[in-house]
Amino acid sequence: MKRHLPTINFIFLIVLTCFFFYDSHVNDIKTFKEIQAERLSIIGPDKNLYISISNPERQALATTHGIPHNPGSKRDLPGILFFNRVGDEVGGIYYDGTDEENFAGITFDQQKNDQIMAIMKDEYLEEGEWKRWYGMFFRERSDSIRVEKLYDQFLERTKSMTKKEKDTEYLKFKKHLDSEINVYRMFLGREENKNTGLFIYDSKGNERIKIYVDESDNTRFEIFDKKGIKTTY
């Protein structure tokens, strides 16, 4: 019997090793009471990133075909970002705030572009009074023009300007984006002036229909023609 002990021990070791190897591969699900991490990345077998849950400092950048936009930049919002199977960021959930401002949103991106639908809210203190707006937005975006490239051109064009000059140019740049590139088409919610209702815009971002209740509980129905002339009902 003693003569066969080494053989028995060896077989037992093989069986035990096979058991642990099988157990580690079959029972991949682990239960934790709490996980602490600066960022959690959900990936597929092909290493493609599908979900990023992150703090502000380690948040993933927007990507197209897995290539980050403005790789030298950074995002500074905590939240969850979603990516499709070809490496495009397609939307997410963000939130943040201080004692003077807090904001949050859920966004849905256009194919190979930025958000076209979003649920957002923003609250901020102004001269001791809280200002608030919140609701659902719809945008119309160009398929052939990417905002990131326009923004890079804007930075290059204004890099030698003073802060005041840059601020003036940015307002012009923003107006151009909102009227030609990222056009608001509809807002359903509450504005900062406390009007709550449905606001519809044309293809140039101009108000055309407003159906709302104002802060004094008056019902309003306004229609604007192409020249901006208002008719109230």
Image: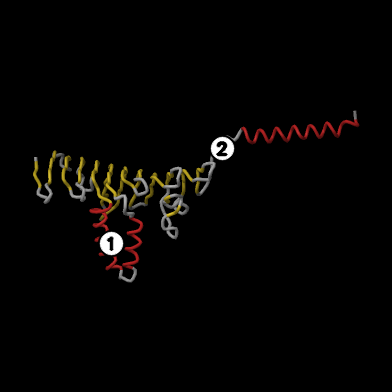
| Distance (Cα) linking label 1 and label 2 | 48 Å
Residue at x 16%, y 40% (from the top left corner): 211
Above or below residue 107? Residue 164 is: below
Mark 1 Cα-neighbour bin, 10 Å: few <14, some 14–19, many ≥20: some
Mark number displayed over residue 32: 2
Give x and y (percent) for residue 31: 57, 35
Residue that label 1 marks: 170
Label 2 SS: loop
Residue type for callout 2: Phe
The image quadrant of residue 149 is: bottom left
Pinpoint residue 135: horizontal percent, then vertical percent: 28, 42
161 sits left or right of 229 in the view: right
Q: Is residue 35 above or below residue 147?
A: above
Residue 197: numbered disc = none
**Residue 56 point in image, percent of width and height:** 44, 52
Residue at the limit of the structure toward the top, as seen here? 1
What colouring method underlies this structural image?
A: secondary structure
Q: Quadrant where the C terminus lies?
A: top left
Q: Is residue 55 left or right of residue 221?
A: right
Which quarter of the image is occupied by the N terminus?
A: top right
Q: Position of residue 53 (x, y in %)?
A: 46, 45
Q: Where 142 falls versus 155 (above or below)?
A: above
Few, some or many C-alpha atoms within 10 Å of disc 2 (few <14, some 14-19, many ≥20)? few
Tell me the SS state at disc 1: helix
Q: Nearer the viewer, residue 26 or 146?
A: 146
In screen coordinates, is 5 left or right of 96?
A: right
Kind of residue indicated by mark 1: Tyr
N-term mark: 1 or 2: 2
